Amino acid sequence: MKIATWNVNGINSRLAQVLEWCESERPDVLCLQESKCVDAKFPHSKLRAIGYPHIEFHGEKAYNGVAIISKHPIEDLQRNFPDDDGDAPRRLIAGTIDGVRVVNVYVPHGTKFGSDKFMFKLDWIARLRKYFDTNFELADRLLLVGDLNVAPHETDVWNPRYWQDRMHFTKPEREAIHNLKRWGFVDLFRQINDEEKAYSWWSHFHHDFEKDRGLRIDHIWASPALADNCTDCWIDKGPRGLEHPSDHAPVVAEFKL
DNA sequence: ATGGTCGCGGTGCGA
């Protein structure tokens, strides 16, 4: 099983790149974040046409939005937290594929240190931890994938001193993300790649991609039971170098199931 | 390094 996560920053403006990437990489499952469109405008027919008949999306106008695109059936679908209101931002979609529970999230950005949105981000990550405590066990085959919007460690940041008080790498965010991870998750990129510096996001400003000034904020985390079956995990920088790219690159993991 | 560039939607906001 090959699964990928990609914050596409608008599925309709990125559709050609997503189709081309799926045709060349052939993941079994692709989890998207920031689809930025209402469900009626999600371009599912073109994805079905290239061999992805199972598509579930949970979007809204202009902001947020998550989706799961799969070769195989998606069972027991869930949209947002069970206790979310109907008007909550659409940031979580989960389903079971080939016996693996896949939880695809777009963690809030946080905007500015100490702001209401920053507190919302910290609270959202705490709720995500509680969601796993309540609904899952370590022996389950479980994946948490998506844009976690936090770089956990200094090796995940091009310049830790520059980033130490900036969004994605502040102390409270890192504490929140480490608390989430202490549910028992294994960071698959680190399991495979040890201390290698590699990023999944580069700002559109300052030609940051060309200078490789990025952050590793997109993740594939597995329960211990599933991490044992992971054979590889990597970041595909290719799409980030195309014309009119998303600011994020896909992260990919492979499993022997 | 306090600007810079995107997508969405048709203005300014969020990232």
Image (tube, coloured by chain):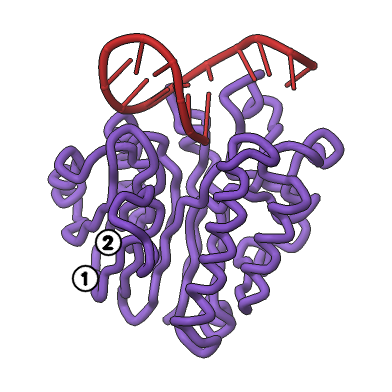
Chain colours: A purple, B red
Q: Amino acid at mark 1?
A: Pro
> Circle 2 sits on which residue?
A70
Q: Amino acid at mark 2?
A: Ser
Tell me if label 2 and label 1 are in contact, CB under 8 Å: yes
Q: Residue at x 44, y 47 (%)?
A: A6
Percent x, y of residue B5: 52, 16
Instruction: Identify which residue, A105 or A55, lies in the foreground.
Output: A105
> Circle 1 sits on which residue?
A73
Residue at disc 1, secondary structure: loop
Residue at disc 2, secondary structure: strand
| Residue A113 falls in image quadrant | top right
Which quadrant holds the N terminus of chain A?
A: bottom left
User: Residue A206, which numbered label?
Assistant: none
| Residue A19 falls in image quadrant | top left
Instruction: Identify which residue, A6 or A257, lies in the foreground.
Output: A6
Query: Crowding near pointer 2: few (<14 within 10 Å), some, many (20+)?
Result: many
Q: Is residue A203 left or right of residue A47?
A: right
Q: Is residue A40 above or below residue A251?
A: above
Work out whether residue A231 can be spotted: no
Percent x, y of residue A87: 31, 49
| Residue A99 falls in image quadrant | bottom left
Percent x, y of residue A27: 36, 58
Q: Is residue B2 above or below residue A92?
A: above
Q: Are marks 2 and 1 on the same chain?
A: yes
Which quadrant holds the C terminus of chain A?
A: bottom left
Q: Is residue A89 left or right of residue A234?
A: left
Q: Residue at x 50, y 76 (%)?
A: A132
Q: Is residue A159 left or right of residue A128?
A: right
> Mark 2 falls within which chain?
A
